[in-house]
Amino acid sequence: MTAAILTDLTKCVGCQACVWACKELNGLPRGDDARALSATTLTVVERHGNVNVRRQCMHCLDPACASVCPVGALHKTPEGPVAYDESKCIGCRYCMVGCPFSIPKYEWDRRVPRVQKCVMCYAELVSRGRQPACTQVCPAGATVFGQREALLTEARHRVASEPQRYIGHIYGEHEAGGTAVLYLSAVPFDQLGFPTTVRKDPYPRLTWNVLSNLPQVVSVAGVGLIGIWWIVRRRQELAATRPPEGER
Amino acid sequence: MRGRLSRLAAGLTFWRLVLAGLLALGAYATVVRFGRGLGAATNLSDAFPWGLWIGFDVLVGVGLAAGGFAVAATVHVFHITHYKPIARPAVFTAFVGYVLVIVGLLFDLGQPWDIWHPLVMWNPRSVMFEVAWCVMLYTTVLALEFSPLVLERLGLQAPLRLVRAIYVPLVVIGVLLSMLHQSSLGTLYVIVPDKLYGLWYTPWLPVFFFLTAIAAGLAMTIVESYLSQRAFGRELEHDLLDGLARVTVVVLGVYLMWKAQDLTHRGQLALALQLTPEAVMFWGEIGLGVLLPIALLTWPRVRSNRTALFFAALLVVLGFVANRLNVAVTGMARSSGTHYVPSVLELGVTFSLVAAGFAAFAWAARYLDLFPAARPELAPSPKSTAAARAAAAKAAVQPSPTASGWGIAGLWVLLLAGWALLTVARNREATTRTPAAALASQTARRSLAGVRPAAWPAQPRLPAAFSFPRAAGSPGAVSFDHASHIDAAKPRCAHCHREQFSLLRKGSPLRGRLVMDRIRHGELCGRCHNGKQAFGVVPGECDVCHGQ
């Protein structure tokens, strides 16, 4: 059971209702400059050619940002959204470096800055069993909220029933080990600004492969070092008490 | 009065002026950084969140301190006590390095006052969490390792005895922490396979960071010895430096081979042969920072000449700096889509930290017993041991120095030849394999791109014309057509649909009802249809809207 969002780019009319709803709910400034994701624009409708592309946090099933955060400020909630606890954050910005989709943004101009990204309206709506503001207001039904399995089934159904309308790729089904935000499109995703070199395996596995070996390395190296110290010292003690071989 | 002034002027040497200038710039940068935030002080951005302060202050600062653990292990664990005089400067460098890393982090962290959070808020899956703990613990260990110098100076015997009692476990813990930490800084970048350029990204990053840190740490010890000889007439015995240089060559050689094999195995060697900024920086790093110093330091004549040895070691250090900056900045630039050049204030902070490091070292070299064996006034140590050591050194070098030099040179040629062969083999493999692979990927792309363009959504996809219900007394029905109300090339739905005709509140009471009075008062359609932005309500011309 994972809360998820399916965005069908062939249905998006580009009205930006999702953008304004998001800003309203999160109390973000509503200037007319919502052209790219930023610390004040957590979802955006980009134009690529003649396609409207709504971008937001992908809410990975195994998120890189949550795995790299040294204090657990970013964390995967049981309901599915990747939420942020600003009282824990120390501002190291490793989440911004680690995110394969480069989603988290920073409040560079504030003296007490926060990381900002879509948290799927977790505290206000999703944790109370309601849907996020963006899917609530979409007049075209282009972006919808639901359980990930149900939305995947729906997406597959749409692709199968209108194969001429969609490319066969459901973005987010396997990207980064699967994400809770899924996309359908008529145009290949590499033409729409989506990173397409994203790996199919969860990213945290890359660093965990190293980190999980550290206890072994430390214990073996520790015993080895102390052993060497012990043996070398004993040898030197013996060498000191015995006459040197050349004098025998 | 005049005498005091001239004394002051004499004290103001060129380098002191430079130092003062840098510290002033650093102080100004500090005010801007903490007064107005990271955005005002740095050229960092959402696309480039880590810059010079992480790349240099943290990655380089920690790495240069690696000499501390390498030498401490040599002396206290492997009991090669002959190297004991090096231990103190090396440990002190490491300690200063770590303190400066922490100061650098305080600048870079968005919320530096929360730097203690990793102590109580745990995420063991995070490399950064491990780095945080290692920095903290190892700084403590280094402070303890270094404390005998201060305690000796202050003549505090009781704590001195305590530190000496726990010294060996302390060193072992320090070595372990350091190994973890040096490699972890590389592990930080293991999670960005798509962002870090292929010349640097590899799952072996932790090992490479570890190896290069050892080489740079040892080279740094040579550099420091030379500089303190210049400044204070205190330095290390030359045969010790010679030994350090040899170990540096071996470590760099191992690194070079491993790096070459890794590049070939991952099929990234071709990237080094293209003319890109990355390739230029890569060859700068490898050529000047690894290949050249290996060549120089294998040459006995370089090792026996104090100045030449210094410059060769300096190359190793600079190559190491280039490596860390390449990973943190050069290698991340292409994927970020922006250009990052550190701001003057970023440079100011970094240079100030470096200057502070030099100042701390100079202070310690003057006031603490940093180079105990090398102090001329202490030189007359018990004659027998000095003679024994000289004899031992002679015996060690005896098997003809030139012969051993040639031996190393031969080894070095063999290694180079091995790499060349590997490269040739790899290239041949690549050329035989490429066409088929390229063809396959091309067809794959075409099949994706071949999706009927007709299925592309026509833009803008506007809602159908909307007919408002006809009220009593209305002269005719009003129908609203989106197409005649927007700029089709740049539809801005939110221009109207934010307040008066909110899309954000479904079932808003305005839906479906237009009231002429309100329109006349500049609401609803009247917001634009006011006779200025668009035609207004004109008596007798109702049919312009009604009854279409």
Image: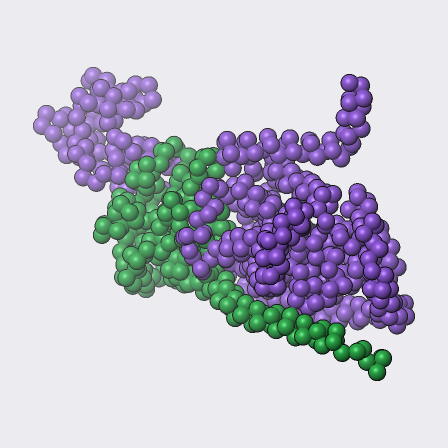
Between B297 and B165, the one lying in front of the other is: B165
| Residue nearest the viewer, comparing A218 with B174 | B174
Q: Nearer the viewer, residue A53 or B463?
A: A53
Choose between A35 and B259: the one closer to the eye. B259
Question: Does A6 appear above or below B264?
Answer: above
In the image, residue B174 sits, relative to residue A17, either above or below, namely below
Q: Quadrant for the C terminus of chain A, please.
A: bottom right
Apparent side of residue B357 relative to residue B33 in the rendered image (left or right) = right
Is residue B401 visible to the viewer in this orientation of the structure? yes
Return the residue found at the far top: B539
Which shade is chain B?
purple
Q: Residue at x 50, y 62 (%)?
A: A207
Q: Is residue B330 visible?
A: no
What is the basis of the colouring in this image? by chain
Count the labels in the image: 0
Is B140 left, or right, of B369 in this rendering?
Answer: left
Residue B113 percent across, percent down from the top left: 46, 41
- Given the current orientation, which residue lies at the most extreme bottom position? A248
**In the rendered image, which quarter is residue B452 located in?**
bottom left
Vertically, is B151 above or below A33?
A: below
The percent position of residue B107, horizontal first and vertical second, equals 54, 40
Q: Quadrant of the N terminus of chain A?
A: bottom left
Apparent side of residue A120 relative to residue B220 in the rendered image (left or right): left
Asked whether, in this view, residue B49 is left or right of residue B271, the answer is left
Residue at 75% from the left image edge and 71% from the top image edge: B418
How far across and how far down the image is residue B336, in percent? 54, 48
Residue at x 79%, y 42% (from the top left corner):
B231
Chain letter, colour green: A
Residue drawn at 70 percent across, 73 percent down:
A237
| Image coords of residue B82 (percent x, y) | 76, 63
Quarter of the rendering containing residue B544 = top left
